Amino acid sequence: MHIKVANLLARSVRYVEAGSGAPIILLHAFPLNAEQWLPQLSRLPPRVRAIAPDLRGFRGTEPFVGGESPDITMDTYARDVLELMSHLDVPRAVIAGSSMGGYVALALWRRAPNRVAGLVLANTRASADTAEARAGRDRLIQLVETEGAPGLAVALLPRLLGETTRREQPDLGDAVEQMIRANEGRGLQAAMRAMRDRPDSTELLASISCPTTIVAGAEDAVVPPAEADAMRGAIQGARLVVLPAAGHLSNLEAPVAFNDVLYSSIRRRATWTSN
């Protein structure tokens, strides 16, 4: 496993890479960073190349470059990922996204379906924010303005991890808090505005024609399994896996079970391709 920096045309991107072979891009949740995927990167099966980038604005990176518009969108993140893939000579890859990373994965499919060999959508939803959710984002944007990343960590941690995790893995909460605190306020606020204003992708689901796996946590208080099941029903051939005793960060809370699902998606993609 190696931490690397890609110097792209307008910005530098920090990413973690491990293995070689069939590529999979791992897109982290809000408000974490690429380190979210260490349990997956450290247990790669043979012939798999995993790449986990920090999305722009995370882990202290500057969200805006030069004269760029301050209005970052999910499409902005998707363009960044596509540019990184081209830089790394990855024409197509399985795209795995957790929570906000799932929103970016759907934006990637909307923008460049030919670059997506498969999808793993974990603890995420296709629908846009409700009015109540948008108001909640605005409150958190203001919270970050006054209290920064530490204040956001206090506000979000109780909902990010499932009840079983909080009871049986107390150290995991500390690790997640450190990931949140590694971010700067401007990047967090830009991401929350992008999530608040993202388009509804429900209609997009019917167009997804690559092998797709949806992962839910049985104790997810942010995206309940029922929403994940609705996504499964809208994507032809998709499968749904609900991980017991896991909350919104299922790849961290149940890494062994999550890895089985994630890497079987690589094999599933190979099966689809050969048919």
Image: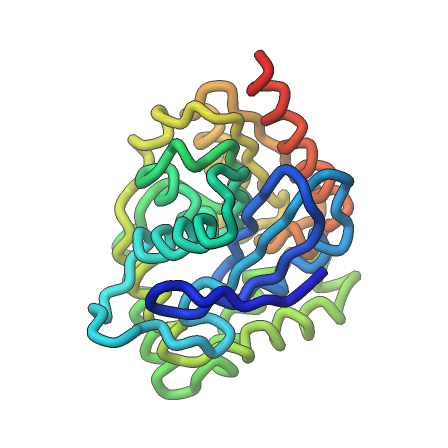
Q: In what quadrant of the picture does the N terminus appear? A: bottom right
- How far across and how far down the image is residue 12, in percent? 44, 69
Judge from the rendering whether residue 99 lies leftward or rightward of residue 174; answer left or right: left
Question: Front-most of 63 and 243?
Answer: 63
* Picture colour scheme: rainbow
Q: Quadrant of the rendered structure where residue 259 is?
A: top right
Residue 181 x %, y %: 55, 79
Residue 111 is situated, as x and y percent measured from the top left of the image, at: 31, 40
The quarter of the rendered structure image containing the C terminus is: top right
Q: Which residue is drawn at 44% across and 49% down?
A: 86
Q: How many marks on residues?
A: 0
The reply to whether residue 133 is in sight is no
Task: Farthest residue to the top: give it.
Answer: 275
Viewer can see residue 15: yes
Camera-nearest residue between 161 and 59: 59
Residue shown at the point (62%, 24%) measured from the top left: 270
Between 271 and 149, the one lying in front of the other is 271
Is 104 located above or below residue 182 in the figure? above
222 is higher (above) or lower (below) than 23: below
User: What residue sits 32% from the left and 38% below the top?
Assistant: 110
| Residue in view at x 28 percent, y 42 percent | 200
Res 236 → quadrant: top left
Residue 188 locus on image (x, y percent): 40, 72
